[in-house]
Image (tube, rainbow, N blue to C red):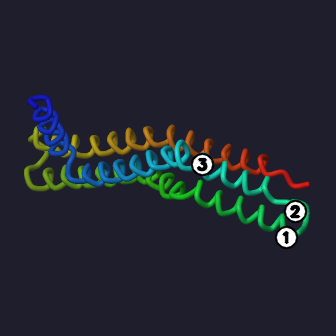
Amino acid sequence: MLFLIELIESVRSFIATGGNVLYFVAFALLLMWIMMVERYWFLASVYPKMRDEIIANWNARTDTTSWYAHRIRDTWISETAELLERNMITIKTLVAMCPLIGLLGTVTGMISVFETMAQQGTGNPRLMASGISMATIPTMAGMVAALSGVFFSTRLDAKVKLAKAKLVDSLPHH
């Protein structure tokens, strides 16, 4: 319990140092990871059953060579591909947005530095330092959030493409 309290306090301190923009970075990061975990879960548990059912339905057909049979096959592949790719564009967008949100923090932190300089002059480095850290911490947080998403979203995208290719190969058309 003490560990949790210390963790919450250190997060509060980090956000106080970096500014309110960190809430937006945290929200984008949380949303991105929820979507990626859902996609990994879909690929690991839901999709295999769906794939096996489609393959069984195709193999149970007596007609796999007519134009009509090929349209059915293409429809099944298309519908499955759509389910596989669900939220992938949103995940990639969130990965790309994280550094941009961090840069927003940089701009707001620098505005704070300039306001301090305008009001207090350049003689108080301590006041300017808080604005500079408010400018750099969100940038770092946005970059770290994006880096965590780049690796896993790229890997997830490769798994989706492989799953689609294997499905197409599993439904032979004669």
Q: Residue at x 10, y 35 (%)?
A: 5
The quadrant of the image that shows the N terminus is top left
Q: Which residue is mark 2?
A: 63
Above or below for 58 versus 165: below
Percent of width and height locating residue 27? 31, 53
Residues at circles 2 and 3 in contact by the CB criterion of under 8 Å: no
Amino acid found under the numbered disc labelled 3? Lys
- Compared with 90, 121 (above or below) is above
User: Callout 2: helix, strand or loop?
Assistant: loop
Reply above or below: 21 against 66. above
Q: Residue at x 19, y 45 (%)?
A: 15
Task: Assign a secondary structure to mark 3.
Answer: helix
Q: Quadrant of the C terminus?
A: bottom right
Q: Please tell me whether residue 153 is drawn above or below residue 70 in the rendered image.
A: above
Q: Nearer the viewer, residue 15 or 88?
A: 88
Give the x, y percent position of residue 155. 56, 39
Relative to 109, 159 lies left or right: right
N-term-proximal mark, 2 vs 3: 3
The residue drawn where x is 58% and y is 49% is 47
Of the pair 78 and 65, the residue shown nearer to us: 65
Q: Disc 1 designates what residue? A: 68
Callout 1: 10 Å neighbours few (<14), some, many (20+)? Answer: few
Res. 38 visible in picture:
yes
Real-space CA distance between mark 2 and mark 3, rounded to the nearest whole angstrom? 23 Å
Q: Nearer the viewer, mark 1 or mark 2?
A: 2
- If you read the primary sequence from the N terminus, does the residue marked by circle 3 or circle 1 appear first? 3
Residue annotated with mark 3: 49
**Is 120 on the left or on the right of 53, as rendered?**
left
Look at the numbered discs 1 and 2 and tell me whether their residues touch, using CB distance below 8 Å.
yes
Regarding residue 110, the answer to whether it shows in the image is no
Secondary structure under tag 1 reads helix
Query: Which residue does the image show at 86% across and 60% down from the upper left?
Result: 62
